[in-house]
Amino acid sequence: MALLAYSCKKDMNSTDESAKDNDAFTAYEGHFLDALWKLNPDWASDVGYHKYDSVLVIPNPASRSALIAFTKVQMDSLAKYNPGTLSEGNRMDYKLIQNHLDATQWAIQQEKSYEWNPGNYNVINTFARILNENYAPLPKRLRSFYQRMANIPAYYKEAQKQIKNPVPELTTLASEQMSGGVSVIEKDFADSLKKTNIPEAEQKLMLARAQASANVIKDFAQWLKTMKNDKPRSFRLGKELYEAKFKFDIQSAGTAQQLYNAAVERKKELHGNMTKIAVKLWPKYFGKAPMPKDTLDLVRRMIDTLSVKHVKPDEFQSAIEKEIPQLVSFIKAKNLLTLDDSKPLVIRKEPAYMAGVAGASVSSPGPYDKNGNTYYNVGSLAGWTPEKAESYLREYNQYILQILCIHEAIPGHYTQLVYANKAPSMIKSILGNGAMIEGWAVYTEQMMLEAGFGNNEPEMWLMWYKWNLRSVCNTIVDYSVHTGTMDKDACVKFLTREAFQQQAEAEGKWRRVSVTSVQLTSYYSGYKEIVDLRDAWKQKMGDKYNVKDFNEKFLSYGSAPVKFIKEAMLAKTTTEAK
């Protein structure tokens, strides 16, 4: 009894210490975020923290030194806590903060993209967010906008000094995005002023600064377009930088090389599944015509035949708008997930300052602005040649368009980000893991089809396998390009031949891989780890497994790396089983 009493007392003391550590760590997180936003006002605005909307930090060695000093101070603060005494959620936050600090130092000291990626100096996105989000009365937002413009001349004067040997592809993209997006400052700001009762004299000052700012941005875009660059940096990261960036950005359980190897094997598996379906469907679409002996040709013939079913160019966005309610109805009918109908999803034409990277994307409100709009950005086909538009629409045919909406909106990105904003941890939302976010969107495509979406038609499954192959080949292409020597011709040939993509899609992917790095691996990386976790969870739960329970439990952890969520979920299951 004495031993038992001692043991209980010891446990109580341990619990008290743990509670103190967790309270202290929670307080530290608040101090960490306060310091983070002072140095990163653009990022603060993007996540809905608007205290520093009027601030535009000049990009120079002094501002980078301030960031390095910040990381060192925070590393010292973090070292005072023992992760072993923290709660499960705080332990995840600890690791996320640690990863962010390490990644910041690496980006400034090793990657140095501020020297070779002019896109780092595109300020328009934050101005657009200040203008378009209704987090405060319009006059207040416009005055923040006005104050923030004050530093634009100094900002771009300094930007020209920082750019040393820019990547040509990134230089072109930055110039295009700034030229296309400058209307936010030159036109949209003026249109918004007309809706206010700001005194006329003040409005004149605001308009004059806006025009001067727009001219500076247009001059910078023109400077990029015409600058002489005898020794440009290659857009290829190289294996050493690539592996490091993969480690920080993806936070996977394995390396980039290991993921590449897994993707190669997954490609073979998908080809086998697609061949079986194509053989089954052949008589339905080709009658007694002989099947191609080459299985890739067989699958290609079948996909090409199905791809002719697509919307007209001017109906692309409206077709997406019609699809969303159908997805909501299906999820509710199948009881796959609890949806929050109060969070608005706005489908809009992709803004010009975002164009040139992805054909469709989602922009969500930050964790500080949870009632803000989530935008489903749809690329426009205006101005495309009929041949290019037809190629694009065959890629996003009537089957793929439905899968795209699952991925981008419901229950993909839009739904996951709504859940993430509800998670109690601000850190998990702010330092969210891109591979978990993209992986969830890919996983939901499979989950929806497994629940009967598309009526289990083999045509839909064939197209989903093709879509899943896209994620797999994203990894193969990204790794092959940035750590190897794959060129445009080889990339396009690979994607059209082995991923069954249309020419326009394949060429668009080449452009994307030449202006981004590592991000394209996040789809397959996150998907693979989520499916592996679901299978392990199924095994642990046995007869008690329920897809809705898994989905909601997984999403409850916010946008943490899947490897952290896996550790937490399986540990809990083991405990519950006992």
Image (spheres, rainbow, N blue to C red):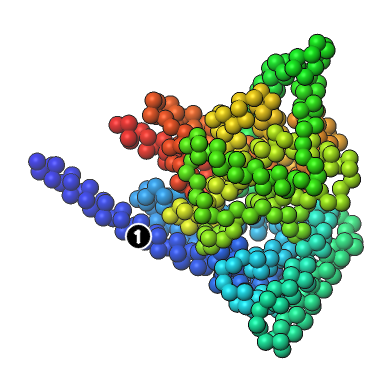
Residue 547 in the figure: left or right of residue 269? left
Neighbourhood count class around disc 1 (C-alpha, 10 Å): few under 14, some 14–19, many 20 upward: few
Residue drawn at the location 72% of the way across and 65% of the way down? 124
Quarter of the figure that contains the C terminus: top left
Q: Is residue 470 above or below residue 100?
A: above
Q: Position of residue 270 (x, y in %)?
A: 67, 25
Q: Which of 357/157 is in front?
A: 357
Task: Tell me the amino acid under the disc marked 1.
Answer: Asp
395 vs 36: above or below: above
Q: Find disc 1 in the rendering and name its residue.
A: 23
Q: Quadrant of residue 226?
A: bottom right
- Give the percent coordinates (x, y) of residue 255: 60, 38
Q: Quadrant of residue 27?
A: bottom left
Residue 127 vs residue 337: left or right?
A: right
* Observer-nearest of 348 and 97: 348
154 and 195: which is toward the camera = 195
Looking at the image, can residue 352 be seen?
Answer: yes
Percent x, y of residue 30 = 45, 64
Q: Residue at x 73, y 63 (%)?
A: 122
Under circle 1, the secondary element is helix
Q: Please tell me which residue is depicted at 84% across the width and 39% down the height of the picture.
A: 390
In the image, residue 120 sits, relative to residue 196, either above or below, namely above
- Which residue is situated farthest in the bottom direction here? 201
Name the residue: 67% across, 28% down. 460
Q: Residue furthest left?
A: 1
Residue 270 in sight from this viewpoint: no
Toward which corner of the image does residue 38 lie, by quadrant?
A: bottom right
Q: Quadrant of the N terminus?
A: top left
Residue 22 place in picture, x, y as percent: 36, 56
Q: Is residue 137 left or right of residue 268?
A: left
